Each structure stands twice: as structure tokens, then as C-alpha cells.
Amino acid sequence: SDLSKKFNGLAAVDNANFTVKEGEVLAFLGPNGAGKTTTISMLATILEPTSGTAEINGFDIIKNKSDVRKSIGVIFQDPSLDDELTACENLIFHGVMYDIKKELMEDRISELLKLVDLLERKDDLVIQPIMN
């Protein structure tokens, strides 16, 4: 309730309040700059609110981040790969987001990289610079 996020003193989300009951579907619509992505990022525990709180599936987004992440799935409009990280670093980032234990994460990353035939390129940046 009263979920807010400020960046350099500017309110991106100002006291958002809404309830979605089990079985309901919510369409989160609005113009560019309305705070949709910021709100969803706070609810998905990617961004910490400046003030206020919320519960997702009964879990507090600040106190129970790991439980929130395990109970939801979020797909953003833009790709979630960081082009300044390597393939391996991107997979580690997502593993940490989902609170996967280090040993299991290492095994899964190797399996995934083998599956897509990228094990030899695991330390390459996701987007390679174009050389002229």
C-alpha cells in the first residue's frame, strides 16, 4: 500500500494502491513515463520502493524477496540480458535473482550453455562490438 519510488527526488510512482484477488487478471496500462515498469519492477523485487510496501501471494516484497521471486513470473517488454555482461554473468545474475544455490547454479549454467552450444563462449560479452 502507498507504494512509491523516487529517483533524484522526482516521483516515478506516487502512493500506488491496488488489489488483485486470486483468479483475477490485471491489465496495467498507461502512457510512457506513467510508472508502469517502475511499479512492476518494485512488485517483482527488482527495485526497492522509496516508501510503502506490497504483498505478492502473501509475501512482503521487502521482507520476503526470495519467496516473491519464486512465486511469480515476469516478462518485460525489453530483453533482460545485460549486454555489458558475459553470457555466464547474465545467467549468474538471474540465478541470484531466483535465489538458486551456488552449486546448483553452476551445474545449471553449464547445462544451459552446453544445450545452446555456447559453453566455449561463456566469457564473451552478450553483444560483441562491431570492428571496422
Image: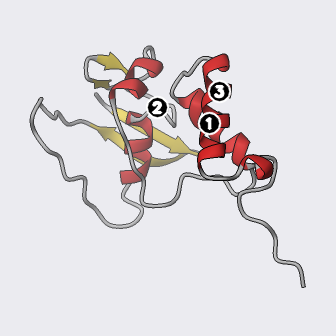
Let me know if residue 125 appears in the view: yes
How many other residues sit within 10 Å of disc 1, few (<14), some (14-19) or many (≥20)? Answer: few
Kind of residue at disc 1: Glu
Front one among 121 and 52? 121
| Left or right, 86 with reference to 22 | right
Residue appearing at x 46%, y 40% in the figure: 5
Residue farthest bottom in this picture: 132
Q: How is the image coloured?
A: secondary structure
Kind of residue at disc 3: Asp
In the image, residue 68 above or below residue 80:
above
Q: In x, y percent, where is residue 27? A: 19, 53
Q: In x, y percent, where is residue 118? A: 70, 52
Q: Earlier in the sequence, mark 2 or mark 3?
A: 2
Query: In terms of secondary structure, where does tag 1 sit?
Result: helix
Let me know if residue 53 appears in the view: no
Residue appearing at x 51%, y 27% in the figure: 98
| Left or right, 47 with reference to 106 | left
Query: In terms of secondary structure, where does tag 2 sit?
Result: loop
C-beta proximity under 8 Å, tags 1 and 2: no
Q: Which residue is mark 1?
A: 111
Report the Cα–Cα distance between label 2 and label 3. Answer: 25 Å
Report the Cα–Cα distance between label 3 and label 1. Answer: 6 Å
Kind of residue at disc 2: Thr
Query: In terms of secondary structure, where does tag 3 sit?
Result: helix
C-beta proximity under 8 Å, tags 3 and 1: yes
Q: Which residue is mark 3?
A: 107
Residue 77 found in image quarter: bottom left
Q: Which residue is mark 2?
A: 45
In the image, residue 47 above or below residue 132:
above
Q: In x, y percent, where is residue 120? A: 79, 49
